[in-house]
Amino acid sequence: MEYDIIFVLGERYFDHPLCGIAILKRWLEKNGYSVGVIETPNNSEDIKKLGKPRLFFGVSSGAMDSMVRNYTALKREREKDEFLGYEKKAPDRAVTVYCNWIKEKFKDSLIVIGGTEATLRRFSHYDYWDNEIRKSILFDSRADILVYGPGEKQILEIAEKVKNKKELREIKGTCIKTREKKEGFIELPNHEEILESKEKFCTMQNLLSNWENLAQKTGNFYVLQYESPRYTSKDLDEYYELGFTRRLDNKMKGFDFSVVTHRGCIGNCNFCSLRLTMGDKIVSRSEESIIREIKSFTKMPNFKGVVDDLGGPSANMYGMDCFLCKKECINCSKLDRSNKKMISLLKKVREIPGVKKVFVRSGIRYDLANEEYLRELKHHISGKLKIAPEHVNKKILQLMNKDKGNLEEFIKKFKEAGGGDLAFYFMTCHPGSSMKEAKELKEKIKQLKNAESVQIFTPTPMTVSTCMYYTELNPATKEKIYVPKTFREKKEQKRILGLKDYRKK
């Protein structure tokens, strides 16, 4: 069979709405295109197994950057760690490797790259693993176009343009490489400038956004970013109700009947990439769509009455949609913090005939949870409720942009609501953290008792915290900050916190 589009994927493929490529495949097929998938190819010969596509190859490393997947925060190869039991499925810098394999076997094929790895490397960026500034991934991969963030609208428009032999220009949510400077684009400091100046790197970081047309010069070329398309509740309803089989093998069991309620995150934590991947605005599915999806489970032979997870990046952000401006929603006095839409949804889904239990396992933002929500949430907790204070020192929390809410007040409210136990997740070695702040975190962990793990900060491309790590400056103020960089100090900050190594669990 000759396919219109062939996806090359750096992780396991499964026909489930939690697999981004599965959504794209189903969506393209609904619109009349034939789609094949090559998962985790081992070499360039594997690229040939489905032949040459009529329109293009789509390349993604998957839900994670391949370097984050293959290495620990201390740059150790996960595959060589006996405690992790990790099996390396994708090569380092998978997107670039796959594209080069395609160029080797199908020289004239058009290549579209997307997913987390491409999204977070779309402009010049600091690469923690090489400890250097790298150019946009468009250069190394030699791809024709890059899709950033969610890609349903983009991939369909690309398919239609290629089919009709039109140029891949003016497509919202994409980046291209061109020799032409474009009017109406905000120009970032060029690649050569940020190599020479860390202050220029901070300037670039402050301009990064999904909601603007951006341009960056590198040598004789410009990388142009067309602003993100606007996704709506109606769009998400259609995508998540595409009729997935949800068939998973035994290694991937445990989230068969998970339901995505919304996309995006308004938290804008500086160490997190969600602002530039899923977006910093909430887009919620309709209540009716979510209920229809869960009702469909009851007709499936392997459904045992349990919805594994109901939520998104933070479950209680459901219903907090607003596109009135480009400012941070979480700081806005007009943000609807009532949790009414989420409470209504939770009450209705646990009344669906055939549903015994609906769990919220994906964690919540404790600063956005009120008493009424917590009283309902107690019906949906499996074991412990996950929350991530990340740190306790005020200065570090400000540098993380995580200084909202009052942890002690939340713990008190949660206990009064009868919610059960909490699981706390923390981070050490974030820019600004010295041994003094690590010891302060240690004392708090002793009091809380239920700390599950502490992770060492990993600088991932294009985040604000990674900018801090590389420049040793606060990009918002250009003030100098302390950054723990040596292997020895990172290990010591983790060690003094007194938690068992999570890898051995």
Image (cartoon, rainbow, N blue to C red):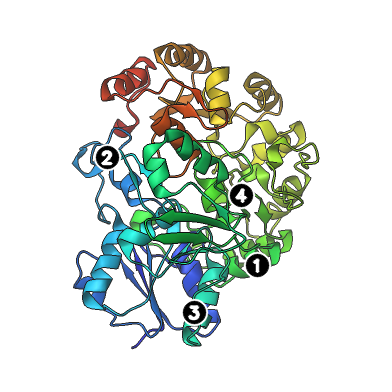
Q: Secondary structure at mark 2?
A: loop
In which quadrant of the rendered image does the N terminus lie?
A: bottom left
| Viewer-side residue, 52 vs 239 | 52
Crowding around mark 3 (Cα neighbors within 10 Å: few <14, some 14 to 19, many 20+) is: few
Eyeballing the image, is 82 above or below 31? above
The reply to whether callout 3 and callout 4 are in contact (CB within 8 Å) is no
Q: CA distance from mark 1 to mark 2?
A: 38 Å
Residue 84: mark in rendering:
2
Whichever of callouts 1 and 2 sits on the residue coming sooner in the sequence is: 2
Q: CA distance from mark 2 to mark 4?
A: 30 Å
Rendered residue at 51%/87% (across/down): 164
Whichever of callouts 3 and 2 sits on the residue coming sooner in the sequence is: 2
Whichever of callouts 3 and 1 sits on the residue coming sooner in the sequence is: 3
Which residue lies under the disc numbered 4? 358
Which residue lies under the disc numbered 3? 167
Q: CA distance from mark 4 to mark 1?
A: 24 Å
Q: CA distance from mark 3 to mark 1?
A: 25 Å
In which quadrant of the rendered image does the C terminus lie?
A: top left
Tell us which disc is closer to us: 3 or 4. Answer: 3
Residue 235: mark in rendering:
1
